[in-house]
Amino acid sequence: MNTTGNGNPGRARILDPKNNKPGFLYHQLAEIIRRQIEEGQLKPGDPIPSLNELARKHNINKATVRQAIAELAAAGLIYTIPAKGSFVTDGHIAFNVRKRGTFNIVWISAISDRGLTGRFYTEILDAVRDNLRNFNANLILYSVPNTSPAQIRTMIRESGIDGAIIVGPTGIEPLHSLIASGLKCVAIDDRVHAPNADSIIVDNEGGGHIAVQHLLSLGHRKLAFVTGPHNWTVTRERLNGARTAALEAGLDPDSIPVIESDFSPAGGYRAFLQLIAISPRPTAVFFFNDEMASGALRALYQHTKLHVPQDISFIGFDDISWSALTHPPLTTVHVEKDAIAREAVARLTENIGRHNHVPTVTLLPTRLVVRESVVRPFSAKGEKK
């Protein structure tokens, strides 16, 4: 019997006298812990003994213990938090996961089918999928528009949902009802106040500040802002940061034209047609996301003889993959989309099945990415001021 070296468990002596069938050591150890959970010796939320403790107690190596832990996790009986250990899951979730052999996570979007902020969330969604591969989990996509709270409840029940990643404003129905149901949730880009929900938010105010501060540092004083819907938290936060930067530079924030749009490329296209009617024309425009900036670029080339950045500078927000491919490449505020995805998956996998969940709010920083769409403003003679 090999219990050292490469960690191959082989077949071995009986670890527990209650088990009269020899077999793989890791499977025997998993059965011991499983019975302790079923008999109530280990309760939901209780920690499992460490690898070292289990290896010492049963005179086996840590590789064998890891295999036992992996078997129990795959059955939904325990979950592991990196650097903290393994813990017993909630009973009903353990039963559901053990029966299915996997976790079911729903990605539920409050963004309408018209494609609002589509690319930003698509990039996060792709990263969430990649991260969930490490946790034996299925990802189910669901859209809120035209959906009632009753339909959401039916979806959760029939699909056996264990947790949810919520995208967009959470105050609307049926998202409010979903959170109130007690399902473990993570909200992206909005703050949730519920005992079962974590929030992952971007430093939108700081991002708005650094975007406008960059324009001002180059000498721009004739600015315009193209925002998202006024009732969205991200819009208000980015606008607050932008206006604060303007005020610090001695500008009257209320004198800066603000055009409300919808975060879509088509919305940016329409907003630019309003911008070119402003007199005097702005020398720089802060778009509250890259998709609106890309739509505005298309409108500029189709309806005017202006050029970016020679005649007008554009700056965006999010740093989606498109932003490096526009003509010219877009200066923008970078958001760590991979970090959002990793944190969302970590929050859910740590908290599904836990009774003593303490809600957390994770704030992710932003930074400026300088490309070619912003330069110093030009004078009427075509010289840089």
Image: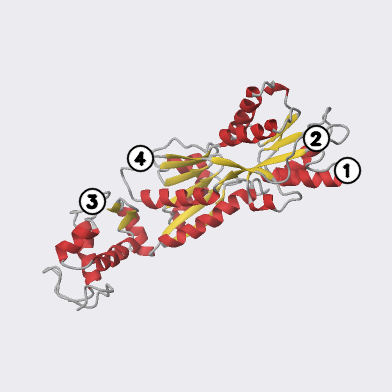
Q: Where is mark 1, residue-wise? A: 305
- Report x, y in % for residue 312: 79, 38
Q: CA distance from mark 1 to mark 2?
A: 19 Å
Secondary structure at badge 1 equals loop
- Report x, y in % for residue 379: 84, 32
The answer to whether residue 235 shows anywhere in this view is no
Q: CA distance from mark 1 to mark 3?
A: 70 Å
Q: Nearer the viewer, mark 1 or mark 3?
A: 1
Amino acid under disc 4:
Val
For residue 21, side relative to residue 242 (left or right): left
Q: Which mark is residue 43?
A: 3
Q: Where is mark 2, residue-wise? A: 384
The answer to whether residue 311 shows anywhere in this view is yes
Mark 1 vs 3: CB contact within 8 A: no
Q: Earlier in the sequence, mark 1 or mark 2?
A: 1
Mark 1 vs 2: CB contact within 8 A: no
Q: Where is mark 4, residue-wise? A: 358
Q: CA distance from mark 4 to mark 3?
A: 18 Å
Residue sitting nearer the eye, 336 or 147? 336
- Residue 135 falls in which quadrant of the image? bottom left
Q: Residue at horizontal 51%, vertical 42%?
A: 175
Q: Nearer the viewer, mark 4 or mark 1?
A: 1
